[in-house]
Structure formats: C-alpha cells, structure tokens
Amino acid sequence: MLGTLNTLQSQIHVLAKTVDRLEMHGRRKMLLLHGVQEQANEDLSQLMVGFIVDKLKISEFTLKDIKRCHRMGQSKNTSDKPRPIIIKFEQAAIRDQVWFSKAKLKGSGTTISEFLTQSRRSTFIAAREKFGVNRCWTQEDIIHILSPDNTRHRLTTIAELQSLQFETAKPVATSKAVPKARRAAGVKK
C-alpha cells in the first residue's frame, strides 16, 4: 500500500513539472513591466512602443512587434500603485532584446520581469529569501542561484531549491570571544 502511494506521489510530481513546463512554454514571449503609471483611457500598445523606444533605446521597435498587452488585475481607483503590464511579443527574439535592455531602467522605479508561473514565482521568492536578492535571478524562465561557494545552480521547483544543501557562514567572533576561544584552546596572545 505504501509503495503504491509513493508511486502515485512521484507520478503526480512528474505531471506537475510537465504542466508547469508547458505553461512556461506558452509564456516564453511574455514580459511583465512594473511601475508604469496608469492614465485614463490609455492606449497601452502605443504607450509600450514609446516606452521601449525612449527608455530602452530600441529604435526599430514598432507596434507590429506587440501581439497584445494589458494591465493585470482589476482597476482600483484608490490604489496609488500601478498595476503591472503584461506584454506578449510577436517574436521571442524581440522579447529577448527588450529583456536584455532592462538594465537601462536601473534607478527609474520601473522594472521588467519574466512572467513566471505561480510555482516558479514562489520558488524564486523563496530562493531570494534564502540566498539574497543579488545572488538569484531568472533567465529564460529558469531560476539561477549563485551559492555561497560561488557555484551556479539552475532550478525550477521548490523541491530542487530545498535539495540544495550548503554550509552556512560561521559567525564572526567578537573581540571578547576571541581571547576566550584562544584560552580554551590553550593558545597564548
């Protein structure tokens, strides 16, 4: 009975990974843009063309390069925080060009992120909490982690994140603790 349950659990895990991979494949031409102020009766396609040409300096970008775009979620008049904009590009190459130009937005309050599935997004957030913001990033829908020993890891699930085992950094001894540790070890000044 226990063997059957383990088999079913592993099959469910494989199916969940497959569904997640297929869903990410459908999102491969999409990006999220955060921090763009909402305007009444805005034409998002035109707004995005202007934004990409002006801010990201991609001069050959046109309206034909956008398959569709819209703001996510319900409009809330009471909220000052603008809703993110999801953009689906006609070609993956154009999406990549926009993605790799995102560094030009540094310090502007506007960011670009990949449109991850809920499970990958949760894994990415957990990785950032565990390893820090500067040691985790996404690229081509894969979560990349730079571990404390400076090795790179690629993952997509929370189980893969949990399986990463690293020795935690040892706390630095204070000036009072060092002499005590030396005396305990029999070391003189």
Image (spheres, grey):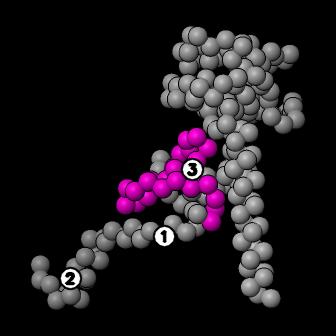
Task: Identify the residue under disc 2.
Answer: 182
Real-space Cα separation, disc 2 to disc 1, in angstroms? 31 Å
* Nearer the observer, 75 or 151: 151
Real-space Cα separation, disc 2 to disc 3, in angstroms? 43 Å
Task: Identify the residue under disc 3.
Answer: 143
- Which of pointers 2 and 1 lies earlier in the amino acid sequence? 1
Q: Is residue 8 above or below residue 39?
A: below
Type of amino acid at the residue the image marks with label 1 = Gln
| Residue 41, image x, y percentages | 86, 16
- Which of pointers 1 and 3 lies earlier in the amino acid sequence? 3
Type of amino acid at the residue the image marks with label 3 = Ile
* Nearer the observer, 119 or 64: 64
Q: Is residue 88 above or below residue 145?
A: above
Q: Which mark is residue 100?
A: none
Which quadrant holds residue 99? top right
Within-10-Å neighbours for mark 1: few <14, some 14–19, many 20+? few
Q: CB under 8 Å between callouts 2 and 3?
A: no
Q: CB under 8 Å between callouts 1 and 3?
A: no
Name the element at disc 2. helix
Q: CB under 8 Å between callouts 2 and 1?
A: no
The magenta span reads 136-159
Residue at the (87%, 31%) spot, across then down: 75
Q: Nearer the viewer, mark 2 or mark 1?
A: 1
Within-10-Å neighbours for mark 3: few <14, some 14–19, many 20+? many
Real-space Cα separation, disc 1 to disc 3, in angstroms? 17 Å
| Residue 89, image x, y percentages | 69, 25
Q: Judge left or right: residue 57 versus residue 75.
A: left
Task: Identify the residue under disc 1.
Answer: 165
Within-10-Å neighbours for mark 2: few <14, some 14–19, many 20+? few
Q: Judge left or right: residue 68 versus residue 53.
A: right
